Amino acid sequence: MGSNENNIGYIYYIYWFSTVCVFIKILSSLFSLLNNYFLPHFRKPQDFKLYGQWAVVTGSTDGIGKGFANELASKGLDICLISRNEGKLKNTAKEIERNYGVKTKYIVADFTNPNIYSHIKEHLIGLDVGILVNNVGIFIDKAEAFSRHSEEHIKNVINVNMLSTAMMTSIILQTMIVKKRGLIVNVGSAAAEVTAPYLTIYSGSKAFVALFGTGLAYELKKFNIQVNTLTPSFVSTNMFHKHARAKNLLSLISFTVPSVELYVKSAILTLSSGDVKTCGYFIHEVLLMTVRFISVDILNKLIQVWFAPRKQE
């Protein structure tokens, strides 16, 4: 009898301990939402020029990268654009100069090539770089098992999504440490936060970005260098619309897919929150918090239903 009472007592304490933990987790999540997405509207706007006069943005002729280039230019920073298409670079540079009256510079670089970094470093000499936006990235043309990816595709994802973040940070960081000021923004993905069948190489590469960025943030605090990692879900970019099922998804949950302009304005506000990693957009944060309460097995089944290859595709 006494043994049964003891067991009931243990169950009782475990129940209440679990309840308190869940309650604390919910309160923490609510505070995070408040701190990242509501309080920044009432804080003094960041003066990004205090970091330095130039912002360097990779993958800057389309999507989130171009959005960041425009938003930072609107705040008076000169912009260095780095992408592979020289025609797009010229047009984007002219557009920014015309719209915001700032200086621009562009560097032609294909990030699938791991030997481009001495070329980039040479062209950045003499610039007072205060902000680096590591945005360049590639998604997958179609969802398929990792075993079906070509060697070239695997190398391209690693070079563009992972190596670029590490190498560009290494290049810019040396002068930031000397000046004891700087801001590094790494654009990752919500895919880094979940186990994602049929997106394994992509989600794995973005998990590197998230872990690299959050770890670096704590390393560089003593040098007064801020590092923020963004993990957005779907944003209305060319990369998103090229995906085979994007239109179907957009029709189902269009309210969760912001325009580039809306996403970037929101993400820039979260940089003042003090958190080293956010989704950058309120609805994306709520979705990710919800996903964390779902069983991994159930979540993976849902991902497989959506992303698993279909015969007609």
Image (cartoon, rainbow, N blue to C red):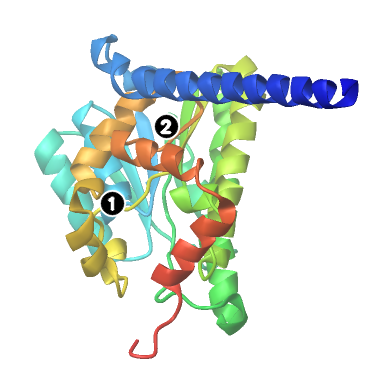
Task: Give the SS element for disc 1.
Answer: loop
Residue 168: tell me if it is visible: yes
Residue found 71% across the figure and 19% down from its top: 13
Instruction: Please say if the residues under marks 2 and 1 sit with CB atoms less than 8 Å apart.
Output: no
Q: Which residue is mark 2?
A: 131
Q: Position of residue 94 (x, y in %)?
A: 16, 49
Give coordinates of residue 278: x percent, y percent.
44, 33
Residue type highlighted by circle 1: Val
Marked residue nearer the N-terminal end (2 or 1): 2
**The C terminus sits in image quarter:** bottom left
Mark 1: give few (<14), some (14-19) or many (20+) Cα within 10 Å: many
Q: CA distance from mark 2 to mark 1?
A: 23 Å
Position of 41 relative to 196 (above/below): above
Locate the N terminus by quadrant: top right
Q: How many numbered marks have been drawn onto this rendered protein structure?
A: 2
Asked which secondary structure carries label 2, the reply is: strand
Where is mark 1, residue-wise? 235
| Closer to viewer: mark 2 or mark 1 | 1
Q: Residues within 10 Å of mark 2 (few under 14, many from 20)?
A: many
Q: Which residue does the image show at 24% across and 16% down from the upper left?
A: 41
In the image, what residue type sits under mark 2?
Ile
